[in-house]
Image (cartoon, rainbow, N blue to C red):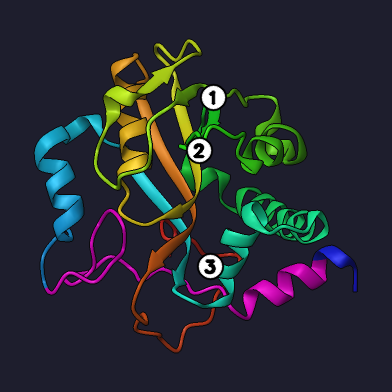
Amino acid sequence: MSPYSRILDSYRNFLVPPPARGSNVCVTCRRGTGDFTRCWQCNRHRQEFGAELADEVVMISMAEKDKQLMRVLSQYKNNKSDEVRRQFTNELASVLATFLAKHSDCLGEFDLVTVVPSSQGRTPPLVDVLGRRVSRTGARFASALATSSANTREMRPDSYEVVTDVHGKSVMLADDTWTSGASLQSAAVALKRAGATRVVGLVIGRYLDEPTTRTSVPFDWDTCVLCA
């Protein structure tokens, strides 16, 4: 078995498929809602910003607190060991490359691919992953956004500066983790206000601070939240 296949097999054991849309699942972030269309947070964003928000948000996996995926999503940026950061970045690059190879048609056509910028002033590792290492995104990648604002988990679109021409373009906006959704949605609003015609968010892990309701359906690389 190749190293690439071993990574995919390993991740299939702990990735958690997002729940299908239904009466008790938020249509945006896939958190349980108790029979409402959107969770409280996403509904608040929708009431304030409406169509300026991302047109679609695609989660690759749910990510429970203290579970393996959240460990990877934290340590690929923050571990003190270069070797550990490199290993986890390689693994997440494989996850993104595989997901995009299988679900590009689900996500639709994009003129530009970018990432939510770091609120800590550093270059997110996803810039290298999507800009250089994933063939399906490299040619269309641009660091289109900048911010100097701290992450408050509140909407702050005015703190994002669009530094690339996005007028009339369809944009895929990637981030590693969704917690409140404020960072990705703020970036989406900024892109829309700069003239982007369509913004689809792609998130590796939707963070949950409580255990998710697991189903008997295992994670399947051939299925995403749009084609399930």
Q: Earlier in the sequence, mark 2 or mark 3?
A: 3
State the extent of the magenta-drawn residues as a range.
Answer: 5-34
Q: Earlier in the sequence, mark 3 or mark 1?
A: 3
In screen coordinates, is 37 left or right of 78?
A: left
Q: Callout 2: few (<14), some (14-19), or many (20+) C-alpha neighbours within 10 Å? A: few
Q: Callout 1: few (<14), some (14-19), or many (20+) C-alpha neighbours within 10 Å? A: many
Q: Earlier in the sequence, mark 1 or mark 2?
A: 1
Quadrant of res 191: top left
Vertical comparison of 194 with 198: above or below: above
In the foreground, 170 or 116: 116
Asked whether 28 falls inside the magenta stretch, the response is yes
Q: Which residue is mark 1?
A: 112
Vertical comparison of 54 with 196: above or below: below
**C-alpha span from label 1 to label 2:** 24 Å
- Amino acid beneath label 3: Met
- Looking at the image, is mark 2 or mark 3 nearer the viewer? 2
- Amino acid beneath label 1: Leu
Q: Helix, strand, or loop for circle 3?
A: helix
Q: Which residue is mark 3?
A: 70
Residue 120 badge: 2
In screen coordinates, is 52 left or right of 185?
A: left
Quadrant housing the N terminus: bottom right
**C-alpha span from label 3 to label 1:** 28 Å
Quadrant of res 40: bottom left
Q: Helix, strand, or loop for circle 1?
A: strand
Q: Residue at x 81, y 72 (%)?
A: 6
Q: Callout 3: few (<14), some (14-19), or many (20+) C-alpha neighbours within 10 Å? A: some
- Looking at the image, is mark 3 or mark 1 nearer the viewer? 3
**Looking at the picture, how far across and down is residue 228, in whole percent?**
43, 65
Labels 1 and 2 touching (C-beta < 8 A)? no
- Amino acid beneath label 2: Gln
Q: Residue at x 44, y 57 (%)?
A: 59
